[in-house]
Amino acid sequence: MKADSLLERLRGLETELHRLETRQNRARLEQLLHPGFVEFARSGRRYTRGEVLAEFSASDAALEPVRAQDFQIAEFGHGVALLTYWSAHEGPSHGVHRRTLRSSLWVETECGWQLRFHQGTPIDAA
């Protein structure tokens, strides 16, 4: 797959994960998250696939809108790609906060592209 089309494909999958309706759809999350998925969150907490699946299954789960931009991709061989970008959460007054550098390792499996690892690093407010 050409780098541009792979970038668009993985950007679409990544931003799908930013939406509450995706996170509350267990079947879709199971498709997108690799069985060995691990996340190092911007908080410093480590999450497993099972923890992510459980976190958003509650009916009162909430997620602020996410802005994401400056996506870049690096391929590490057939079926392995690193997606990097920065994101911010959009508050009620449409101001942004929680700016974060993001990196996601995607692998192509029999089930399609799956997120294997994700890390968020806070961006200094200055």
Image: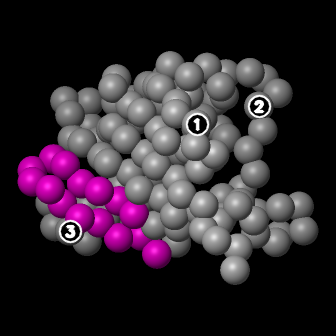
Looking at the rendered structure, the kind of residue marked 2 is Ala
Disc 3 designates what residue?
3
Is 102 left, or right, of 2 in this rendering?
right
Q: In this orientation, which residue lies closer to the viewer: 22 or 79?
A: 79
Is 119 left, or right, of 4 in this rendering?
right
Percent position of residue 32, x then y: 40, 35
Q: State the separation of the CA atoms marked 1 and 2.
A: 18 Å
**Circle 1: element type:** loop
Instruction: Specify whether residue 74 is painted magenta.
Output: yes
Task: Check contact, mark 3 vs mark 1: CB within 8 A.
Answer: no
Q: Which of marks 3 and 2 is nearer the N terminus?
A: 3
Q: Which of marks 3 and 1 is nearer the N terminus?
A: 3
**Circle 3: element type:** helix
Q: Is residue 119 above or below residue 96?
A: above
Disc 2 designates what residue?
61
Disc 1 designates what residue?
45
Is 110 left, or right, of 60 in this rendering?
left
Q: State the separation of the CA atoms marked 3 and 1.
A: 32 Å
